[in-house]
Image: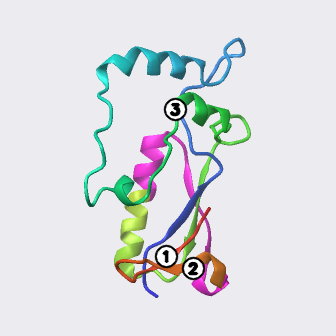
């Protein structure tokens, strides 16, 4: 199978804001969310073909997201690591290098290749074929 699969951003997925010692994590972000709320229009009802029309979700507030304690950059989490699954062509490796540079700029952190694994290590229960398109998919959570 010759598909590009970025299995994950290991280490941290986060925000560039560094909380001070007197400031709880997420506090300034909650304030920003509240100040921007009047500018945001509610999502319209899902239309045919929209993800939510066939995959109902309850949604999540930013406060609920923060309660999950997402990984954030800190003294022990400073680098984004990429885990590659499967075989990559020369062209796909070029795209990966560009993506790696983009992630480093976007997250303002080093991005390194953690390791490469063959698709054969993925157990059957973590694989499926997309129900509409029949393309192979891997559950990476």
- Of badges 2 and 3, nearer the viewer stands 3
Q: Which residues are magenta?
A: 100-123
Say which label, 2 or 1, has the lower sequence index: 2
At x 46% / y 88%, what residue is drawn? Answer: 1
| C-alpha span from label 2 to label 3 | 30 Å
SS assignment at label 3: loop
Image position of 17 (left or right of 3): right
Distance (Cα) linking label 2 and label 1: 6 Å
Which numbered tag is attached to residue 127? 2
The residue indicated by pointer 1 is: 137
Question: Residue under circle 3?
Answer: 61
Question: Is residue 92 visible from the viewing direction of this image?
Answer: yes
Position of residue 116 measured from the top left corner of the image (x, y, whole percent): 60, 75
Q: Position of residue 46 (x, y in %)?
A: 30, 49
- Badge 1 local density, few (<14 within 10 Å), some, or many (20+)? few
Badge 2, how many Cα within 10 Å: few under 14, some, many 20+? Answer: few
- Tell me if residue 122 is in the magenta stretch: yes
The tag earlier along the polypeptide, 2 or 3, is: 3
- Residue 13 picture quarter: top right
Image coloring type: rainbow
Helix, strand, or loop for circle 2? strand
Q: Please name whichever residue, 10 or 64, is drawn nearer the observer in this view of the structure.
A: 64
Q: Choose between 136 and 99: the one closer to the eye.
A: 136
Q: Are marks 2 and 1 in contact (CB under 8 Å)?
A: yes
99 to 63, vertically: above or below: below
Q: Earlier in the sequence, mark 3 or mark 1?
A: 3
Label 1 element class: strand
Q: Quadrant of the C terminus?
A: bottom right
């Amino acid at each position: 199978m010759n598909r590009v699969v970025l299995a994950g951003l290991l280490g941290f997925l986060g925000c560039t804001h560094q909380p001070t010692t007197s400031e709880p994590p997420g506090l300034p972000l909650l304030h920003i969310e509240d100040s921007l709320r009047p500018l945001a229009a509610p999502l319209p009802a899902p239309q045919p073909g929209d993800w939510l029309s066939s995959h109902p979700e309850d949604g999540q507030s930013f406060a609920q997201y923060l309660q999950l304690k997402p990984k954030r950059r800190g003294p022990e989490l400073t680098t984004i690591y990429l885990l590659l699954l499967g075989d990559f062509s020369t062209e796909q490796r070029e795209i990966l290098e560009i993506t790696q540079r983009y992630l480093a700029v976007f997250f303002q952190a080093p991005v390194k290749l953690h390791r490469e694994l063959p698709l054969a290590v993925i157990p059957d229960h973590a694989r499926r074929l997309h129900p509409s398109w029949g393309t192979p998919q891997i559950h990476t959570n």
